[in-house]
Image: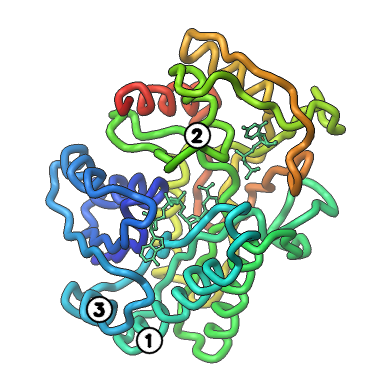
Amino acid sequence: MNILLTGGLGFIGSHTAVVLAQQGHQVVILDNLCNSQMEVLANLESITGKKLRFYEADIREGLALRKILSDNQIEAVMHFAGLKSVAESAQDPLKYYDNNVCGTINLIEAMQAEKINKFIFSSSATVYGVPQYLPYDEDHPLEPINTYGKTKLQVEEILQDLVKSDPSWSVVALRYFNPVGAHESGLIGESPKGVPNNLMPYICQVASGKLPHLNIFGDDYETKDGTGERDYIHVMDLAEGHVAALNFVNQHPGFHAINLGTGVSYSVYDLIGAFEQAANSMIVRKVQPRRSGDLAIYYAKADKAKNLLGWQAKRDLQVMCKSGWNFHKQKS
Ligand code: NAD
Ligand code: UDP
């Protein structure tokens, strides 16, 4: 199929581009490079051995979008483009509503004009908010506790209304848990700009000596060892989940929200331990107060993805740490 990946040079989009191209799909990438680099494109071409069509464009540019959709006879869109920092979304909410919500409306309007109605959206486990029970299943109440999460929920609601108004649309909102790791080649991975917010990229920078120590944000949670627990998922598993979702949208009109997680939670200490083994180095750490806005523990109920998409995560914590570290070493 001819598939447009918005934000396709970013962390998750680039890994999905590899899997799609390797399965014979025609991948077209659109990205405004606000959080990615052009060199990712060359690396994608070297991994896949294929030339990929790329447009430096913004999802908020309606006319450009329509031309890209029609020139490439796009049949389905995977929408990764978005801003994702919880902290920044608190400081600059309008930037987040503009990019994530207005940008998505603009994109689906362009799709509607070009009569394209298959859509896979990058949603997030942050839509659930404070757990009322765990694991989160897709019917858990949706009460995001930060602006970033609200933008994801608003888009899901817009998509649901769209499907109600025109049942020929086929939409899957994939609610990702905590993506980590990198492609086995070490050519693509996660390269946050500035000091990382997330645990795995931060640990990589401590291991390489770029940062002096890891701050552990709280060791007094009601979890197995007092540190926060999350459902870490290998980005290649996530990428394969998108291919499964593509097969599904081809046959199932309607709106479907589906968790992509492993169903297992690991603590900060678990991740440090696995990383130390994978990288064969010690991670200097200091326990600090809790980070504001953090939840103690959450993880996915992953059954819906298994039942509807025939997909489940395969790669374990060791593979996540090894591949993440391999990418970081090659890059630095
Ligand atoms: P990323 O920042 O690496 O990739 C996003 C890409 O979108 C970047 O290349 C950026 O340049 C591009 N982009 C942003 N705004 C754009 C715009 N207006 N027009 C065109 N391109 C634009 O992020 P990622 O980790 O790959 O995340 C992809 C999607 O998944 C995002 O929507 C994010 O909110 C969502 N998500 C990510 C995580 C995570 O932890 N990484 C978890 C849940 C959901
Ligand atoms: N965390 C930490 N130190 C860091 C970054 C994160 O202790 O430098 C903890 C954080 O408190 C949480 C877990 O690691 O319990 C995962 O955090 P991350 O920011 O990677 O993901 P999210 O909070 O978005 O789930």
Q: Is residue 117 left or right of residue 287?
A: left
Helix, strand or loop at label 3? It is: helix
Q: Which residue is mark 2?
A: 314
Q: Earlier in the sequence, mark 3 or mark 2?
A: 3
Instruction: Please provide percent x and percent y for residue 24.
Output: 21, 53
**Element type where label 2 sits in the image:** loop
Q: Secondary structure at mark 1?
A: helix
Give me the residue at 40% from left, 61% from top.
246
- Near mark 1 (Cα within 10 A), the count class, few <14, some 14-19 or many ≥20, is few
Q: Tell me the mark number nearer the camera, choosing from 3 and 2.
A: 3
Real-space CA distance between mark 3 and mark 2, rounded to the nearest whole angstrom: 38 Å
- Quick check: which quadrant has ligand 2? top right
In the rendered image of this protein, does residue 199 appear above or below residue 127?
above
Q: In this rendered view, identify the residue nearer to me: 325 or 170.
A: 325
Say whether marks 3 and 2 touch (CB < 8 Å).
Answer: no
Q: Does 50 sit left or right of 151 as displayed?
A: left
Q: Which residue sits at x=38%, y=52%?
A: 35
Amino acid residing under circle 3: Ala
The N terminus appears in which quarter of the rendering?
bottom left
Q: Which residue is mark 3?
A: 64
State which quadrant residue 4 falls in: bottom left
Q: Which mark is residue 112?
A: 1
**Neighbour tally class for label 2: few under 14, some 14-19, many 20 plus, Cα within 10 Å:** few
At label 1, the amino acid type is Gln
Residue 106 location, quadrant: bottom left
Point out the tag, 1 or 3, that comes first from the N-terminus: 3
Asked whether 308 or 99 is in front, the reply is 99
Q: Amino acid at mark 2?
A: Lys
Q: Nearer the viewer, mark 1 or mark 3?
A: 3
